[in-house]
Structures are given as C-alpha cells and as structure tokens.
Amino acid sequence: MAIIQIRDVPEATERTLKARAERAGKSLAAYLRDLLNEEAAHPTPDEVMARIAADEPVPYDPDFVAETLREGRR
C-alpha cells in the first residue's frame, strides 16, 4: 500500500475530520482512507464520458426498434 501525506491542511478542517472520525468510531487515518476509497470507487463524469466514447457504436435500425415496441405492447 502507498503512503500519502497531505500538507497545509487548515486546523479547522483537521478538527472537523477528527471529530467525524471519532463519531464514526475510527481513527483519523481509517476515516480518511475510507473517504479516499469511496471517492476512487466512483468515476468522474469525464471518466464516464471517456469510457462511452471508447465503446463500439451500437447499430441502430429504426424498423427493428418500432417492431420490438409493437410486439412489447401486445
């Protein structure tokens, strides 16, 4: 695992995060690790758009779509 160090965090921010960690029953390191893992687990809108752009186009046949919709309504 990597070690990440963050400098110049305002004291008020540190106090707030320590209090939140304490309320969650975690150390500050565990609390921040969970926050970072949660952030990394969700792609940004730019990442989502890049993935979509990299996908193969889906063929579109309007007659097939219309027929499928008609069949589904029966």
Image: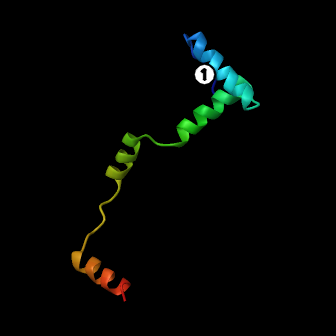
Q: Quadrant of residue 19?
A: top right
> Going 68% across and 21% down the picture, which residue do you hit?
18
Frontmost residue, 61 versus 13? 13
For residue 3, above or below residue 43: above
> Going 67% across and 29% down the picture, which residue do you hit?
31
**The residue tagged with tag 1: helix, strand or loop?**
loop
Frontmost residue, 23 versus 38? 23
Left or right relative to 2: residue 63: left
Residue at the right extreme?
25
For residue 74, above or below residue 1: below
The quadrant the N terminus occupies is: top right
Left or right relative to 4: residue 61: left
Q: Which residue is mark 1?
A: 4
Residue 51 shows up from this direction = yes
Frontmost residue, 65 versus 47? 65
For residue 25, above or below residue 5: below
Position of residue 2 measured from the top left corner of the image (x, y, whole percent): 63, 27
> Going 58% across and 38% down the picture, which residue do you hit?
38
Residue at the left extreme?
62
Frontmost residue, 69 versus 60? 69
Label 1: how many Cα within 10 Å (few below 14, some 14–19, many 20+): few
For residue 2, above or below residue 5: below
Q: Amino acid at mark 1?
A: Ile
